[in-house]
Structures are given as C-alpha cells and as structure tokens.
Image (cartoon, rainbow, N blue to C red):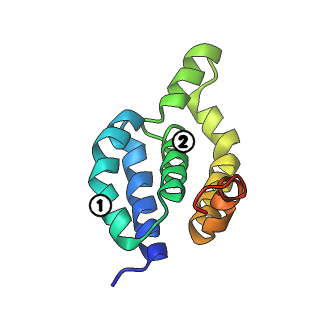
Amino acid sequence: DLSQVAFLLMVNVVFLILGCFLDTAVMLLVFVPMLLPAVKAVGVDLVHFGVLIVVNMMIGLITPPFGMLLFVTNALTRIPIKDMLREGWLFLVMLLGLLLVMTLFPQVVLWLPRSMGYGL
C-alpha cells in the first residue's frame, strides 16, 4: 500500500524529469488525466495535487535543457542562458525546497482554501 506522501514524491520526481523535456501543455493535457484515478484512489486532495503539479511545471519552465522561460528571457534580453543559470540556481534550489515543504505538509497549500470554506 502506497502512502500519500510517497505517491506525491514519486509524482514530483516524474514531473520534474518530464519538465526538463516536455512543454507544460503536454504534461497538463496528457499526464494529469492519467494520474487522476490514482490520485483519487490514494486519497490525495485534488487542490493539493493541482498546486503541486503547477509548481512542478513552473520549475520545468526554468530547467535546462528545454526550459522555455530561459529561451524567452534570452530572446528578450540577450542575456546568455549560461549566465542566467549561473545567477538563477539559488532560485531553483529554493523552489525545490518549497515543493518539498508543500508535498510533506499539505496544510501549507490547503490553509487558505479551507479558511474560505473549501472542504468543510
């Protein structure tokens, strides 16, 4: 039997790897519907899962080799991608830390929705 945390950690790893190579639309339209039955079976809150997926996709947009936001920023500012990566690695580490906290402590994600009446 798979715990919710173990399941979400596996999903995070898969989405972080997919985010390095696939566009966010592909991940959202192909992989999320495939995972929803498993998410419901494990008992993960759908809002929590959705927020984790969005953060995973956001991290994928800035991760090499196909980080779309790196290419867009390069085209707009002419800053070399290697310079952006050299300066931005700390932000990536902080985002990964935030993703871990949000995965391990769902109340961080669900506090605001619940305070507004979600799930009562």
Mark number, residue 37: 1
- In three-dimensional space, the C-alpha distance between marks 1 and 2, rounded to whole angstroms, equals 23 Å
Q: Nearer the viewer, residue 79 or 21?
A: 21
Q: Amino acid at mark 2?
A: Met
User: For residue 28, which quarter of the picture?
Assistant: top left
Q: From the top left corner, tell me how far across and down residue 87 is, in percent.
A: 70, 40
- Identify the residue at horizontal 70%, vertical 52% (top origin): 116
Q: Amino acid at mark 1?
A: Pro
Quadrant housing the N terminus = bottom left
Q: Is residue 49 left or right of residue 120?
A: left
Q: Is residue 64 above or below residue 117?
A: above
Q: Nearer the viewer, residue 88 or 53?
A: 53
- Dot 1 or dot 2, earlier in sequence: 1
- Identify the residue at horizontal 71%, vertical 54% (top origin): 112
Mark 1 element type: helix
Q: From the top left corner, tell me how far across and down residue 118 is, in percent.
A: 61, 55
Mark 2 element type: helix
Q: Is residue 42 left or right of residue 80?
A: left
Q: Nearer the viewer, residue 73 or 57?
A: 57
Q: From the top left corner, tell me how far across and down residue 73 is, in percent.
A: 59, 23
- Identify the residue at horizontal 64%, vertical 59% (top origin): 110
Disc 1 to disc 2: CB gap under 8 Å: no
Q: Is residue 38 above or below residue 67?
A: below
Look at mark 2 in the image and give the residue it sits on.
Answer: 58
